[in-house]
Image: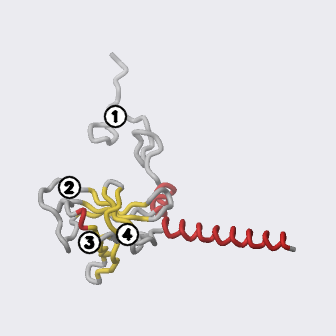
Amino acid sequence: MNQRRSYQIGTGLFIVLGFAALAYLATQTTSVANFQQGPSYTLKGRFTNVGQLKLRAPVKIAGVRIGSVKAIDLDAQRLDAVVQLSVDNRFKEVPDDSAAAIFTSGLLGDQYVSIQPGGSPAMMKDGDEFVLTQSSIQLEDLIGKFLVGGGPSKPGEQQGDTKPDAPRNEAGTPAEQKPTDTKH
C-alpha cells in the first residue's frame, strides 16, 4: 500500500508541474506578461483597420520590443481606429516622420505594431501622432483576391488579354498590329 501511495503522489506532482509549465508558457507567448519597465510616453496612430490587434500587443522597432498597445478606440467622426502606444522612455529617439504599421507574427500569429523610423532630425514627443500608418492586412482579403481574379497567371500577361503573346507598346498595352505586306 505504501508503494501505491508514492505512485499517486508522484503522479499528482507531475500533473501539477505540467499545468504550471503550461500556464507559464501561455503567459509568455500571449503578451499577458507585463512589459512595463519604467516610465513611458504615449504616441498615437490612426488606422482604417486594426484587425485582431489587442491591448498589450507589442510595439517594435527593427524587431525589438520598445513598448505595448495602451488603448484602442474608435473616432466617432472619422470612423478610424485610434491606437495609443505606450513607448518606454529609453526609446525617446523616434523621428517625427516615422511610420507605424500593423503586422502579424508568422502566418497566423498575434498582431503587433511596427514602427519604421524616418530620417527627420526632430523627434516625436508625448502625445504626438503618426502621419503615415499602414493598416492590418486581413488573411481573408488576400485569399479572396487570390481566388477571385488574383491577377495575371503568366509573367507579362494582363487580365482580359485574349492573346498573351501580343506585342505591347511602352505603356504595356497591346500595340496595334498593322497588316503585313506579303507582296514585294
Whether residue 49 is visible here, answered yes or no, is no
**Quarter of image, res 155:** top left
Residue that appears at 36% across and 55% down: 63
Is 161 on the left or on the right of 61, as rendered? right
Q: Is residue 58 left or right of residue 14?
A: left
Residue at 34 percent across and 30 percent down: it is: 179
Question: What's the residue type where badge 3 is placed?
Answer: Ser
Residue 152 % position (x, y): 44, 46
Which comes before the other along the chain, label 4 or label 2?
4
Q: Position of residue 76 (x, y in %)?
A: 29, 83
Q: Secondary structure at mark 1?
A: loop
The kind of residue tagged 2 is: Gly
Residue receiving disc 4: 35
If you read the primary sequence from the N terminus, does the residue marked by circle 2 or circle 3 appear first?
3
In this rendering, position of residue 128 left or right of residue 172: left
> To which residue does mark 3 refer?
40
Of the two numbered discs 3 and 1 in the rendering, the one whose residue sits closer to the viewer:
3
**Residue marked by disc 1:** 177
Mark 2 to mark 3: distance in Å? Answer: 21 Å
Q: Quadrant of the C terminus?
A: top left
Q: Nearer the viewer, residue 64 or 166?
A: 64
Mark 2 highlights which residue? Answer: 118
Q: Are marks 2 and 3 in contact (CB under 8 Å)?
A: no
Rendered view: 126 above or below 105: below
- Does label 4 or label 1 sit earlier along the sequence? 4
- Residue 7 is at least partly visible in this image: yes
